[in-house]
Image (tube, rainbow, N blue to C red):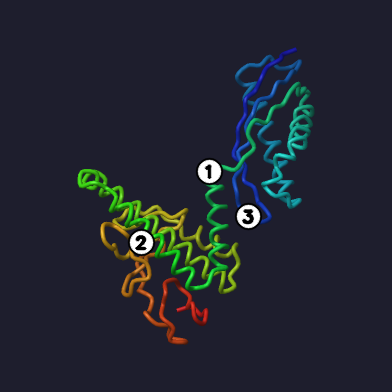
Amino acid sequence: MGDFKVSFGVDINYNDPEYRFLQVTAAGEAAVSCAERAGTEDDITTVKMMIETALIETASQLSVDGVSYKDLTAQQPRFTEAVSSALSSKTITLSSFVLNTLALTPRSQEQINRINKMKEMAAMSPEELQKKMMEAQAAAQAYMDSLSPEERQRMEEKAKRDAEEAAAKMKATMEMAQRISAGESVDSVLASQKAARTDSSGSGVVRVDGAGVASAGVAGAGVAAAGVAGAGVAAAGAPVPAAPRFCPNCGAPNKGGKFCTGCGKAF
């Protein structure tokens, strides 16, 4: 009989009831015994694949059952049982099973933080949203002003990219928040964001969590202007006409985004 240990690790797609499409990392170590396997490299690879498949299938069933990603840790006995059952069907005995990691990937954690921010901003008034944007711009400018002449010379390009990305992320978040406020579902907003994903390397284009947004004007030392009249914003790397300064429906001033903050209609 062969006794051997197997290390495993897999990123699992998880459909969370609140945050939808996430990725969870499951990793750990198992000890197994089998009369027909001696623990060769092929044996270890085979058992590893069986364990990871069982973890994926169990996570899929948990998502169907509506289990939140927050409660996955409490489901470890269910993962262990599934792995044991899968191995025993191939006459392999699970001696021990340790799931060291069962957590969101960094990208999924960032996605959750972004969704929470969108929901928070969707509940704000237009005045509060504008204040948030101004604070973000002021913070970016303060960072630039804090650099010494030598540091400014060495870090100018990096600081410029950071400031533009921060402003672009804030603008993208505000636009999505306005869409949610106008009645569009979070799922729809995320789907359109995914469809607009771009990795363009052109000048002035930054990647914002899968959405490409071009900053259309830089104020001061590399601070991206948001909501400036005449500024063009490019979705997915393609330029589009600038939004009107005033809403053609109610005449309210355009404070940025695709929807009027006065009447809620699209420009």
Q: Amino acid type of disc 2? A: Ala
Mark 1 vs mark 3: in front: 1
> Does dot 3 land on a helix, a strand or a loop?
strand
Give the number of the disc on residue 214.
2
Q: Is residue 119 left or right of residue 39?
A: left
Q: Nearer the viewer, residue 217 or 91?
A: 217
Q: What quarter of the picture does the N terminus occupy? A: top right
Question: Are dots 3 and 2 in contact, CB under 8 Å?
Answer: no
- Find numbered disc 1 in the image and state the secondary structure of the residue it sits on: helix
Counting residues from the start of the chain, the first of labels 1 and 2 encountered is 1
Instruction: Tell me the quarter of the picture where residue 18 sits.
Output: bottom right
What's the distance in space between the residues labelled 3 and 2, CA to CA? 27 Å
The residue at the point 34 percent across, 62 percent down is: 215
Q: Which residue is mark 1?
A: 106
Which of pointers 3 and 2 lies earlier in the amino acid sequence? 3
The residue sitting at 38% across, 76% down in the picture is 243
Q: Position of residue 193 (x, y in %)?
A: 50, 60
Q: Amino acid at mark 3?
A: Arg
Q: Position of residue 231 (x, y in %)?
A: 32, 70
Q: Where the C terminus falls, by quadrant? A: bottom left
Crowd band around label 3 with a 10 angstrom C-alpha radius: few (<14), some (14–19), many (20+): some
Please tell me whether residue 9 is drawn above or below residue 219 in the rendered image.
above
Q: Please indicate whether residue 45 sits to the left or right of residue 83 in the image.
A: left
Query: Any mark on residue 20, and which?
Result: 3
Within 10 Å of disc 2 (Cα), the crowding (few <14, some 14-19, many 20+) is many
Question: x, y percentage for residue 99?
Answer: 67, 31
Secondary structure, mark 2, is strand
